[in-house]
Amino acid sequence: MRYEAPSSFEEASGLLAGETGVTRILAGGTDVLVQLRSGLVEPDLIVDIKRIPGAKDITRTDDGGWRIGAAVSGAEMGEHAELKAAWPGIVEAVELIGSTQVQGRCTMAGNLCNGSPAADSVPAMIAADAIAEVVGPSGTRDVYVEEIPLGPGRTRLEKGDVIAAIRLPARPERAGDAYLRFIPRTEMDIAVVSAGVSLCLDASGKVLDARIGLGAVGPTVVNAAAAADAIIGTTLDDAAIAAMIEAVATACSPIDDKRGTVKFRTKVAGVLAKRAALKAAERAKA
Amino acid sequence: MALDDRFHNRDFKVVGNRVTRPDGIDKVTGRARFGADMTAPGMLIAKVLRSPHAHARINGIDTSKAEALPGVKAVVTYADFASAHAPDDDNLVNCMAKDKALYDGHAVAAVAAISTAVARKALKLIEVDYEVLPHVTDVDEAMKPDAPVLHEDAQDESVPAGTPKNVVRRYEFGHGDVDAGFAQADKVIERSFRTEAAHQGYIEPHACLASYGSDGRADLWCCTQGQYAVRAMCAGMLGMQASDLRVTASEIGGGFGGKTTVFIEPVALALSRKAGKPVKLVMERSEVFRASGPTASTSIDCKIGMTKDGRITAGRAELRYQGGAFPGSPVEFGAMSGFAPYDLENVQAIGWDVVTNRPKQAAYRAPGAPMAAYAVESVIDELCQELGLDPLEVRIRNCAHEGTLSPYGVTYPKIGLEETLKAVQSHPNWTAPLGPNQGRGVACGFWFNFGGNTCVSLNIDEDGTVSLSTGNPDIGGSRASMSQMCAEELGIPYDRVRCSIADTSLLGYNDVTDGSRVTFAVGLATIKAAQDAIKKMCGRAAAIWGIPEDAVEWEDGCAKPAGPNAGEHPPMSLAEIAAVSSQTGGPIAGHYECNADGAGVSFATHLVDVEIDPETGFTKVLRYLVAQDAGKAVNPDYVEGQFQGGAVQGIGWSLNEEYIYGEDGRLQNAGFLDYRIPVASDLPMIDTVIVEVPNPGHPYGVRGVGETSIVPPLAAISNAVSHAIGKRMTQIPMSPPRIVEALEG
Amino acid sequence: MSQIHVTTKINGDETEFLCGPEETLLDVLRDHLGMTGTKEGCGTGDCGACSVTVDGRLVCSCLMLGAEAEGHEIGTIEGVAKGDELHPVQKKFLDHAALQCGICTPGFLVAAKALLDRTLEPTEEEVRYWLAGNLCRCTGYDKIVRAVMDTAAELRGA
Ligand SMILES: Cc1cc2nc3c(=O)[nH]c(=O)nc-3n(C[C@H](O)[C@H](O)[C@H](O)COP(=O)(O)OP(=O)(O)OC[C@H]3O[C@@H](n4cnc5c(N)ncnc54)[C@H](O)[C@@H]3O)c2cc1C
Ligand code: FES
Ligand code: FES
């Protein structure tokens, strides 16, 4: 195994593209090191992106959105007051990943690229309609976060692709987001099921636009568009919420496993989507 | 000076104080050395190859490729032990599979190499020819006539002929006529319960360093609850003389019963013998879960009758425990202990020990008792609910006292169960208001406690300090308690005593640190060793003063003339006697050995409030109270710590901890991420009340306190959850999906 | 397997070491530098026994390669006391009997100190969540939480 710490994303991409064996990108390493330890993967090349200038920066984009470098840790996002005010749901999702110790290292891009359907930041990012800035052998391109997951442990990124940053759009007026997950303990668990909701309201309190991401209810994180449609144009009254819960259940295709049953996941997905939608609306009104 | 073993009231000066432990500084600075912290020059690293199958015949093992890998110094399989040991040593076959792999994770071979990386690589080169067999991991399934059979010949005569072969032992306890008792009841409830297997979950994985010399002598450093037991087992398996194997217990990072046996130590010794070099073997966490000794999973039927005014007329339980791939599940203790808190005229408990394709169980804190208590205390709670009775009053009405004939045949001496019930009754938690979706549960628990083989020495050092040697690893502050009792008896300050844990070459056989025995038995031996030294010091003073020995008494750390013929002599302190010891006959030491008897049984009552999220089944523990009889709390800080730690292990087991096996018989959750032990944010503070009803069998009244605290929580929490959701729960753990299921079902 | 040369500061001391590319910082501390105060309970980030700080931030040393330490400042349990003088949180752990077996203690102390370096007014809930990545199987956390709260109170002069 070789360890490289390049000083640009282009260089990182080149190293990865040039390696014929197994490669891993090392952001926080909180997934990669666990895989190394278990012997599940034996990479030939590890590319550490933390020494790339700018990889640890959180910046405002020209259009009023946000650009979060691929090596920014969960703790660093949590300490960024402005980002937290703009995207509280995203930040709370990232802050749910692991312990204080894991927070010191873990990244959103790593969470996304690890390819787990239970990854906490991904439903929130999908709800936010986040974009990944991908540097590949043929240059830099934007890819919607929603398009990246392909199945457990698999993504649509190709050989030599590296995410340089995650971008979040600018927030309109009266917008809010929220993320909730269910775990049997209060910490240190992988989501049994989760829901992220981002919405904005009109002046009368009606939902103008909404997106809902669901975690751990299928092979990838799900964009539950029909569930979002069920609340758009409503004031989140009981009937709208009931319709949303119904649509959430339809969007779920979970499995029975050690962390939960199909029945439980489907039911709790609706509960969490409801609670997250109401919380997001609270925030939008605040 | 003629103190016997029995309790005598006295004013304690050192015992009962919250002293700082002698190993404290080492443990807060990182200096303390645990199992994996030892190294030796030229040391090799060992790794174990484990079966991926739950049940498979091993037709052959080809290690030649691994042996040929550069850097590999030794490979061992069962064949490397075969010459030396008795053919059917379950412990050995558990450490290294013989002709069958009996569970997922069963060791089949091991490698010692110059580095971890090389050892890992070598494991992949070992070729095992497995013939996969059908497997069974569930206790009820394993008892069926058509279940896959693990051993053809493990069943003994206690089991009725014709019973399926996986049922290996039967036990029965009780007295009276239960059917007649049920006939007297106004209400009889019978229910079936299940509990899943839990792991002790110590944070330190098993670790050892073995160094076998060409002279046939060996040194073994390991984290264990009993260095003498390790020596006995390893020497047997390797065909060594006990005295040729010196075992040193490292600091131990938790055990809870799980480190009372061996898993890797004989393997490391065999590798070291073969390689001619020191070998370090440390389990990975996944190996700890797959291949150490979790506790049994169970299936229990329990039937209890009660009169309208709350008298229990009869109790009957049938308990089925699977203890993994070998006989020895703790069902016997379960059958003995479930009804032990109650004074019953009619009681019967039948236990069935069952083998399955799971790792061989090891002791886990009050082994077997929490599950039995869960069944009994749940049914009592339901009876109280149905009959509209107060669950504490009913327990006070039926509880055992001095003179009660226990279900397992012993008549209790003085015990403190009623005191624990009353302590709960007068605690503010008992009357705290409950909100919506909240429930309150109460339950009692019992544990026997043990004494056992004990050997202690102490040296009166020339400067008037005392070096105390005991033979039991200090797993939670026992060096402090021993030093306290030693100082108390000698009449000197606590900080003049230094207690260390001897290796196996220095003292006689000490039983393992289990059965809550150490503070009781080693404390007893320490007190007696101190008395032995006192006797000698009195003799030295008598010689100096020229008076008879029996004219000298020991008081407040000094020898004093006593009685009419003693004359006038200024008292001589321990330090003064020590200072002149070379002129009065040489060094002074005290010693004591015994097989200690009289460990007082111990009882506890727990009270818990929970709140359930009815939409997700999430349980939040709001308040938790432990009231337990400690006899005499030598160091109250550590007594509370035992109460709290045991209660929290019980909380984890009740709510989320369980071994989950897949269809393929493989363990699905061999890590702390999915084997969910409680984390700090899951819990409230754990309130404690130390009840002190002296144990008549110990000079200071000490009872064991370590284990009882894990007995009541399963039932207490289940009762609380059942009240909160209005449905009776009958399976442990009560994970959120199970609670949602109960709510909807 | 070619070794990587790494220059770091550990507990304030300039330290150089060679490590294999696959070795974790925990492996380096324990096996190469003899600093066995940092413990391994799982090797996969779940128990916190291996807690250290990197540039003041709390991390699991089992989840970091030794090579990643290049140019960073590492803090371990061995650096929590200043010479003979225990850090207040170490003293409080002893006063409150916040350890039984002690295997989790180094990790808890490093984690607790990292919390107290950020705030001296943590609530009980904050302490419990901050320490949720540190498993203790012996104590039930009660006395640990009390020790940390009491240290905070003492340090803020309450
Ligand atoms: C104890 C513990 C608890 C955890 N709890 C949670 C939890 O609660 N919720 C949760 O969602 N996860 C959890 N995880 C998993 C993990 O922490 C997260 O998935 C984390 O976000 C991964 O980020 P990382 O930067 O550490 O990724 P890394 O381990 O560095 O990388 C993960 C994967 O992403 C790829 N990758 C990394 N960066 C890039 C990039 N810039 N471009 C392309 N590919 C990249 C890597 O090649 C690798 O395959 C936990 C892990 C541990 C050890
Ligand atoms: S050893 Fe690193 S978290 Fe357990
Ligand atoms: S004191 Fe033993 S694990 Fe914490």
Image: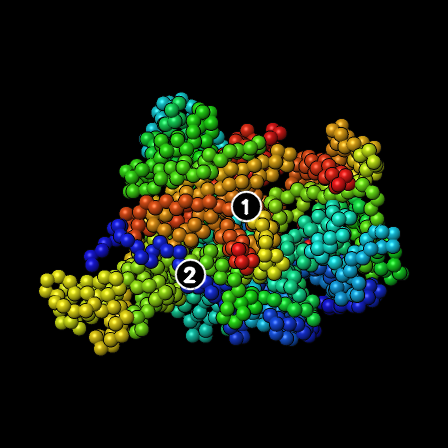
Query: Residue B614's x, y, as percent?
Result: 61, 33
Can residue B57 be seen by looking at this rendering? no
Compared with residue A147, is residue B726 higher up or lower down, i.e. above or below? Answer: above
Compared with residue C33, is residue B230 higher up or lower down, i.e. above or below? Answer: above
Mark 2 residue type = Arg
Residue C65, image quadrant: bottom right
Disc 2 element: loop
Residue B726, image quadrant: top right
- At 44% across and 57% down in the image, what residue appears? B475
Residue neighbourhood size for the residue with mark 1, other residues' Cα within 10 Å, grouped as few (<14), some (14–19), many (≥20): many
- For label 2, the residue is B21
Dot 1 and dot 2 within a common chain: yes
Q: Residue furthest front?
A: C157
Quadrant of the displayed image that contains ligand 1: bottom right
Compared with residue A228, is residue B28 higher up or lower down, i.e. above or below? Answer: below
The circle on residue B683 is: 1
The circle on residue B651 is: none
Side of A118 where B513 appears, left or right = left
| Quadrant showing the C terminus of chain B | top right
- At 47% across and 29% down in the image, what residue appears? B382
Query: Residue B256's x, y, as percent?
Result: 46, 52
Mark 1 residue type = Leu
Query: Residue B36's x, y, as percent?
Result: 52, 64
Q: Residue furthest bottom?
A: B583
Front residue (pair A187, A12): A187
Front residue (pair B627, B649): B627
Q: Which of pointers 1 and 2 lies earlier in the amino acid sequence?
A: 2
Residue neighbourhood size for the residue with mark 2, other residues' Cα within 10 Å, grouped as few (<14), some (14–19), many (≥20): many
- At 49% across and 32% down in the image, what residue appears? B192
> How much space separates mark 1 and mark 2, taking CA atoms?
26 Å
Q: Is ligand 3 less than 8 Å from the beta carbon at label 2? A: no
